[in-house]
Image (cartoon, helix red, strand yellow):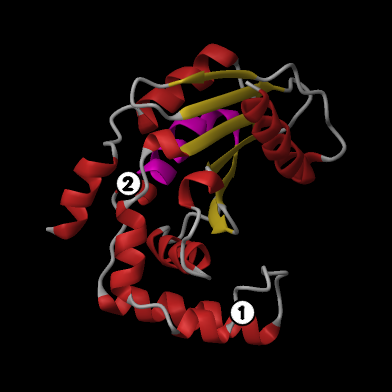
Amino acid sequence: MNKIKTIAFTALSILSVYNAKAQNFKEPVSYKLKNGMNIIISENERSPKAYSSFTLDTKAFEGKKDGIVELLNAVLNENVNKNSNISFKDNSGKLTTLNADLEKDLATMASVIQHASFDQKTFNTAKAKLIASLKLQDYDYDQTVNENSINALTLADVKNFYSQLSPEKTFLTIAGDVELNTAKASAKKAFGNWNRTQELALTVAR
């Protein structure tokens, strides 16, 4: 439970950056979907928008290759298309949307996470953009994320890491202008049918 609370407040702190002038979060409610995914919901009736953060349980991925999460995020961003409400950075995917669009946009983010395209062209484009960002120093990346670590990664590396993702190793935080039961329903609809690691690995391998 302490771990859940720590992640909850960390995620809510990140989300509150988007909404610094309207912080009135209720006590977070945490639970798990049947597939093991950890869900955290915090209502804030003063918030003008709904926010969601998809994060990895870092302890579940200890020993991962340097830069692999950032490169995976770059690939996922290529899969987002033109939905400006969704982005992937650091250890998370972020969603900022209106309450009325939460279910639709959360489903879109879930689809990107669960059904990302990993062809060589997408990988090359994502890798080039990430290296360009590193050269411009337009973001405060971890010191292990540099041109050398990114250039050392292959499409196979990203596919392998992606195949290890599964609901029980992730957290979904929903906060802001949301109603608890509606947010629960949206989370279940978006991620409730997500397969566990073994099934996902078989899908990626095909």
Residue ID at (30%, 53%): 163
Residue 176 appears in the figure: no
Relative height, residue 39 to residue 165 (above, below): above
CA distance separating discs 1 and 2? 25 Å
Quadrant, the N terminus: top right
Identify the amino acid type marked 2.
Answer: Gln
Q: Is mark 1 on a helix, strand or loop?
A: helix
Give 204 or 21, whichever is nearer the viewer: 204
Give 39 or 154, whichever is nearer the viewer: 154
Which residue matches tag 1? Answer: 133
**Residue 54 % position (x, y):** 53, 42
Q: Tag 2: Cα neighbours inside 10 Å, few (<14), some, or many (≥20)?
A: many
Identify the amino acid type marked 1.
Answer: Ser
Q: What stretch is highlighted in magenta?
A: 98-111
State left or right for residue 17 relative to residue 37.
right
**Residue 19 % position (x, y):** 78, 40
Relative height, residue 136 to residue 100 (above, below): below
**Prevailing secondary structure of the magenta residues:** helix
Residue ID at (16%, 59%): 205
Residue 103 inside the magenta-drawn segment: yes
Q: Tag 1: Cα neighbours inside 10 Å, few (<14), some, or many (≥20)?
A: some
Residue ID at (42%, 58%): 80
Q: Residue 114 carries which label?
A: 2
State left or right for residue 161 relative to residue 13.
left
Give 103 or 180, whichever is nearer the viewer: 180
Q: What element carries label 2?
A: helix
